[in-house]
Image (cartoon, rainbow, N blue to C red):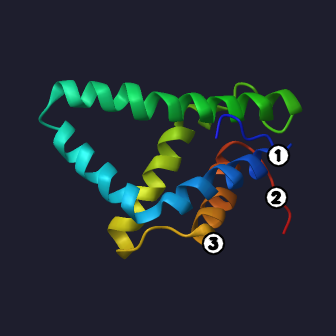
Amino acid sequence: MEDVDTGSLRGDFLAGTAAIIESGPDDHDLMSALANAARTDPELDRAQRDILVAPMQRAVEAVLDRAAARGEIAADAPAREFVPELLFASLIAHKIHTGDFPDRAYLTRFLDLVVLPALGVRRDH
């Protein structure tokens, strides 16, 4: 997602979620197993944060930095710090609540109705 630059915050997030959708259930199952194992293994927990979480957070920050530079969001948007967690949580929570891995339609609605408004982006439908 760090290299994705469509020219808009929404476009960048949608393009970035395409990779998530493509990897889908197989990666979700693996990530769930890793997260569960990391609960009792501090070394695995640290490695998971360094190898998986930190790069995702940097990628989201890069997308948000570009959006701020374009004037789409305020550089100091209060919800900005929560966006990586919101994106990650949406994947986990949807699977838990529905039994299904989120598809493009769900992730698009989540971006449009939760993430973008939290950042102060208004979309006229």
Helix, strand or loop at mark 1: loop
Q: How crowded is mark 3: few (under 14 residues within 10 Å), some or many (20 or more)?
A: few
- Which callout, 1 or 2, points to the residue nearer the camera? 1
From the image, tell me which residue sits under label 1.
6
**Nearer to the camera, 117 or 65:** 65
CA distance for labels 1 and 2? 17 Å
Residue at 65% x, 49% y is: 16
Residue at 22% x, 30% y is: 44
Q: Which residue lies furthest to the left in this view?
A: 40
Q: How crowded is mark 2: few (under 14 residues within 10 Å), some or many (20 or more)?
A: few
Residue 42 in percent (x, y) is at 17, 26
Query: What amino acid is at disc 3?
Result: Ala
From the image, tell me which residue sits under label 2.
123
Please tell me which of labels 1 and 2 falls first in the chain: 1
Residue at 47% x, 56% y is: 90
CA distance for labels 3 and 1? 19 Å
Residue at 36% x, 70% y is: 97
Q: In this view, does 80 lie to the left or right of 102?
A: right
Q: Do the residues labelled 3 and 1 touch (CB within 8 Å)?
A: no
Please tell me which of labels 3 and 1 falls first in the chain: 1
- Image quadrant in which the N terminus is located: top right
The correct choice, above or below, for 93 with respect to 119 in the image is: below
